[in-house]
Amino acid sequence: MPAMAKAPALAASIELHEQPGHLIRRAHQIAVALFHETLGREVTPVQYAVLRALQDKPGIDQVTLAQEIALDTSSTADVAVRLEAKGLIVREVLPRGQRRLVLTDEGEALLARLVPGMNRMCRTMLADMDKNEQAEFVRLLQKFVHLNDDGRAAPRR
């Protein structure tokens, strides 16, 4: 029986390290690693986003919070349960079963402690770019998110 010839492998149309999705995944890995290196492991980046959103809009409900940080409602609920267990937020049940979320004094204090590190982390992430590049990089990230925020992932309001 003759050996079957292997079909030639199809070359990818775009080099891996030029593919936006791959680069975004790598950028996310770098950002998360830098977050933990700079701020420690007391909270995750998503937990930090929840705390910051509650600082900006105290007393919002879980569904609104999920929309604010572009996270699905079940994940937001899980994060809220964890933050409540850490004593960083309080979840209050509202009449229609919604939950109102409020930072505790401990949550406010944690955010106050994290601000210098978060500022340092942001400066570090952009340090090798000049001011114009930094502004353009952030502008393009915002534009990308805005243009692609069509419900495929948890949409932000």
Image: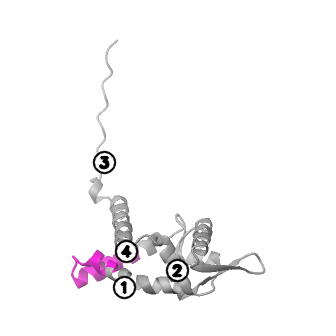
Label drawn at residue 51: 2
- What distance separates the C-alpha of mark 4 from that of mark 3? 25 Å
Residue at image point 38% right, 80% down: 118
N-term-proximal mark, 2 vs 4: 2
Secondary structure of residue under mark 4: helix
**Magenta stretch bounds:** 121-143
- What distance separates the C-alpha of mark 3 from that of mark 2? 42 Å
Residue on which the image places disc 1: 116
Residue at image point 74% right, 81% down: 94
N-term-proximal mark, 3 vs 1: 3
Q: Nearer the viewer, mark 3 or mark 1?
A: 1
The kind of residue tagged 3 is Ala
Q: In the figure, 15 relative to 42: above or below?
A: above
Residue at image point 59% right, 77% down: 87
Q: Nearer the viewer, mark 4 or mark 3?
A: 4
- What distance separates the C-alpha of mark 2 from that of mark 4? 22 Å
Q: Nearer the viewer, mark 2 or mark 4?
A: 2
Secondary structure of residue under mark 1: helix
The kind of residue tagged 1 is Pro
40 in magenta: no
N-term-proximal mark, 1 vs 4: 1
Which quarter of the rendered picture does the C terminus lie within?
bottom right
> Are there few (<14), some (14-19), or many (20+) residues within 10 Å of tag 1?
few
> Are there few (<14), some (14-19), or many (20+) residues within 10 Å of tag 3?
few
Mark 3 vs 2: CB contact within 8 A: no
- What distance separates the C-alpha of mark 1 from that of mark 2? 16 Å
Label drawn at residue 66: none
